[in-house]
Image (spheres, rainbow, N blue to C red):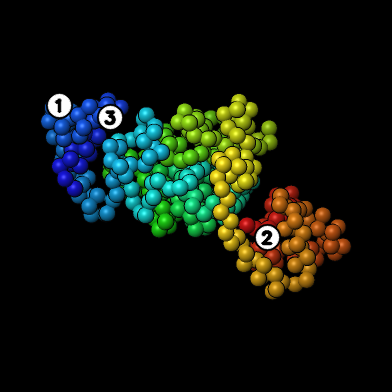
Amino acid sequence: MNTEWLNRIALTYANKTRLRTIRQALDNYGSATEIINCHPELVNHEALTFAQQELLFIEKHHIKTYFYQDENYPYRLAQCIDAPLLLYAKGNVNINPKYAISVVGTRMPSERGKDWCRRLILDLANLVPDLTIISGLAYGIDVIAHKAAIEAGIPTIIIPAHGLDRIYPAVHRQVAIQSLDKGGILTEYTTGTEPERHNFVARNRIVAGLADAVIVVESKKRGGSLITANMAQDYGREVFAVPGRVDDTCSEGCNDLIKRNKAQLIDCAEDLITAMQWQKQDKQPIQTAMVELMHDLSDIQQQLIVLLREAEEGLHINQMVLETQLAYNIVSSELIMLELQDIVKSMPGGMWRIKK
């Protein structure tokens, strides 16, 4: 990298709280080098030393860099007034995908929320193969979204609240590594940056600005997910929210967004595709292998599969007993065998459904 890149890193590092001012100066002077030549007081020795160390890290670890003046900067993010000046990426990140959705939500989702998030992304991946999923690798909905994208074989971009010299939370390291194959990690933070609370709020603007739309899957009345949703709305992005029961604290935030017309209600992949006016690109369903499995199942198991495939939201075991005219213990036993084969999934309240 050349002197201009050294000066870009040093200028950004020394003026973390004045990035909008620096951005205006870049528009006026044309380059970081010219700014420093005219205003050397903006960069001290510490910043230049740090920039040299950062360049060594970038070259050693094959980090991709994006500066807001360059053509390769994310075009969606460039539309945002408070977009970062510098971005660092690891992996095979396409920062300008054809379709991009950010998925956010509570760190303590319900089983329903976890299941819905996964099914939505698998369905979207089937209908919109060019889709990229964006989130922040946090506990709960974030990491579920990343895992579902990896499972579906589509790119996922992680937006952390720290530099590329660490992964937080550490328990999600394997997910971060798996994301590198088709997606990767994108951050504005340099090495040595700790995952402090204010960084999480700041990184939310990248989560919101990098996408065409933001989906909120379960959120309490206050939290980072709602901050991201508000940012997305300010940026002119579409915001969607998954509704829940009125007495469910996990859904208070989503229900409130919908009630105040700050988000569109969504309960399936087709809702989003229709609202975004995207064209479906039907490909072979992810679970077509199930059709082949039917030949290896017992007659009773096949009968249960047929019933469950007709009930998109699932079916109660008592209803299956009624439909098949079989004893409860027989139906229960066959369902358990199907669950062990990872074909069906049990849900609270005696409900069962096909595992997508």
Between residues 25 and 224, which one lies in front from this camera angle?
25
Q: Is residue 231 visible?
A: no
> Do the residues under discs 3 and 1 have CB atoms within 8 angstroms?
no
Question: Is 240 positioned to the left or the right of 169 in the image?
Answer: right
For the residue carrying disc 2, how many other residues have a C-alpha within 10 Å: few (<14), some (14-19), or many (20+)?
Answer: many
Q: Residue at x 71, y 50 (%)?
A: 313
Mark 2, residue position: 344
Mark 3 or mark 2: name the one nearer the start of the chain.
3
Q: Which mark is residue 39?
A: 1
Between residues 285 and 17, which one lies in front from this camera angle?
285
Q: Secondary structure at mark 1?
A: loop
- Which quadrant is home to the C terminus? bottom right
Q: Residue at x 40, y 46 (%)?
A: 96
Rendered location of residue 136, percent (x, y): 44, 43
Q: Which mark is residue 23?
A: 3
* CA separation in Å, label 1 and label 2: 66 Å
Question: Is 24 positioned to the left or the right of 127 in the image?
Answer: left
Rendered location of residue 137, percent (x, y): 45, 46
